[in-house]
Amino acid sequence: MNFDQIVNTISRIFLRRAVNWGLNKGIDTVAGKGKPKGQMTEAERHLANKGRETAKMARKAARITRRLGR
């Protein structure tokens, strides 16, 4: 391996981690943390749970899409 290949490999690793981190943060922000559970009504709690489930599915879809792009 020459130096350029080593640099490219290391940069790809860091770029992949940065993209994964950014996607997860963005999805969490969109899903919203909301209020503490004690202050939520039953309907708000239900919506918060749905939001978390939707965020989890979005992460899975992003992971699958990235895997297909390889």
Image (tube, grey):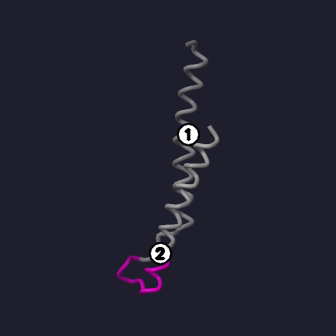
Residue type highlighted by circle 1: Arg
Drawn side of residue 1 relative to residue 48, left or right: right
The prevailing secondary structure element of the residues shown in magenta is helix
Q: Is residue 27 above or below residue 22?
A: below
Residue 46: % across, % down = 45, 80
Q: Which residues are magenta?
A: 36-48
Drawn side of residue 31 relative to residue 49, left or right: right
Quadrant of res 45: bottom left
Q: Specify which label sits upstream in the sequence, 2 or 1.
A: 1
- Label 1, on which residue? 16
Q: Is residue 12 above or below residue 38?
A: above
Instruction: Point out the image quarter for the C terminus.
Output: top right
Looking at the rendered structure, the secondary structure element under dot 1 is helix
- Label 2, on which residue? 48
Residue 22: % across, % down = 56, 50
Residue 38: % across, % down = 35, 81
